[in-house]
Image (cartoon, rainbow, N blue to C red):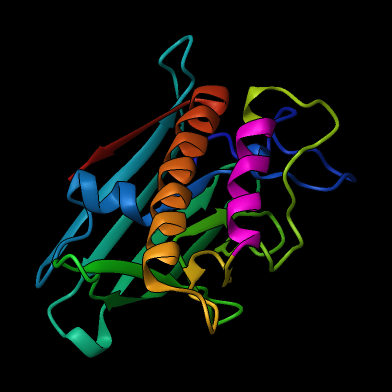
Amino acid sequence: MGGLGSGNYYRWGSKQTLDDCRFLDINLMVKLGAIREYTHKAGSWLWTYKEKREEVSRIEYECNTLDKDNSYLRLYYKFINTNHSVDYKVRLVRTYPRYGGVRFWFICPEKGKRVGKLFLTLNDGRFVSRHVYRIHYASQTKGDVDRAIDKKWKLMEKVGGYDFPLRPKGMHQKTFDRIEDRFYAQDSLCLRMIAQRVGVFNHTG
């Protein structure tokens, strides 16, 4: 995994923030065709610096969704600086939105929770949910990204959930649907803004 852990991309000795980390967004993977219903395929993701279009990280993957009850995303990559290789599976589960179709979710390898995004930390080299290592959003400087993130989590505070909204007992379904739609729209905006800050994500396979 070229370049991870080198330079000052990871800030040793300080708290990690979500915009310091490589992350995997399952909605983006579905959109790009990396994860699909009833398929078995392999490919790779890579990150490049926006300014130079220079590749800085690459991850190989295998997606298997043929068995609905045992779907997984296998991730395997190497850290060049330490020569440490990682090879593990992330379980995939489905939900079925009221408007039809299917939505995929990760099951965090550490917490066992259903989440939409996983973040890479150097503790053990795996992608896990943001809660595992108490990763937090940067708040020292309230820029555009920070304000967008704050707005997203204010929406989450109105409902229940972990990394996705859950309708609280007693809340009208139409009210929840409206908040849920606003949350996912704001979440997509945050991801686009963070991607612009840390680099460009590409997919092959």
Q: Position of residue 144 (x, y in %)?
A: 64, 23
Q: Position of residue 204 (x, y in %)?
A: 22, 40
- Is 116 colored magenta in this rendering? no
Task: Name the image quarter holding residue 77.
Answer: bottom left
Residue numbers of the magenta segment:
146-158
Q: Position of residue 55 (x, y in %)?
A: 43, 26
Task: Name the image quarter holding residue 65.
Answer: bottom left
Is the residue 142 above or below the residue 64 in the image? above
Q: Is residue 182 left or right of residue 140?
A: left
Residue farthest toward the top in the current orientation of the protein: 51
The residue at 63%/29% (across/down) is: 145
Q: Nearer the viewer, residue 193 or 5?
A: 193
Is the residue 90 above or below the residue 48 in the image? below
Is the residue 74 above or below the residue 186 in the image? below
Q: Please identify the dominant SS of the magenta region.
A: helix
The residue at 27%/76% (across/down) is: 94
The residue at 50%/25% (across/down) is: 199
Q: Position of residue 71 (x, y in %)?
A: 25, 79
The residue at 17%/45% (across/down) is: 205
Q: Nearer the viewer, residue 47 or 186?
A: 186
